[in-house]
Image (cartoon, grey):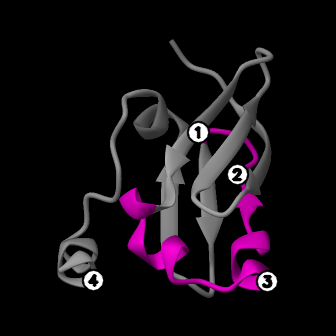
Amino acid sequence: MSTSAKAVRFDEDTLWVDLADGRTIGAPLAWFPRLLHASPEQRAAVRISATGRGLHWEALDEDISVEGLLAGRGDQSRGALAAAE
């Protein structure tokens, strides 16, 4: 199944993504250390890809796929593991 992101927002602990199919999915910011430690302004600087399948934060060097969120996967990079320790 493939769906696309339409909007991204945050609360104190969660990344929320509104999908084109009407669902909203959330993931804990703890899954994404760069977002967890970012300022609200840095978090707000998200770019949704043209297909809607990817989220990108240039200044944070963070990329998140909608597919990964739907599968329940957090940050898979080595840098994320070091930042979480």
Is 71 rendered above or below residue 8? above
- The residue drawn where x is 59% and y is 48% is 54
**Element under label 1?**
strand
Spatial separation of the CA atoms under disc 4 and disc 3: 20 Å
Q: Residues within 10 Å of mark 3 (few under 14, many from 20)?
A: few
Q: How many marks?
A: 4
- The residue drawn where x is 25% and y is 76% is 84
- The quarter in which the C terminus is drawn is bottom left
Check whether the beta carbons of the residues at disc 4 and disc 3 lie within 8 A of each other.
Answer: no
- The residue drawn where x is 62% and y is 87% is 59
Spatial separation of the CA atoms under disc 4 and disc 1: 21 Å
User: Foreground mark, 2 or 4?
Assistant: 4
**Kind of residue at disc 2:** Ser
Check whether the beta carbons of the residues at disc 2 and disc 4 lie within 8 A of each other.
Answer: no
Which x, y percent locates residue 23?
72, 19
Residue identifier under label 1: 26
In which image quadrant can residue 66 be found?
A: top right
Residue identifier under label 3: 41
**Kind of residue at disc 4:** Ala
Residue identifier under label 4: 83
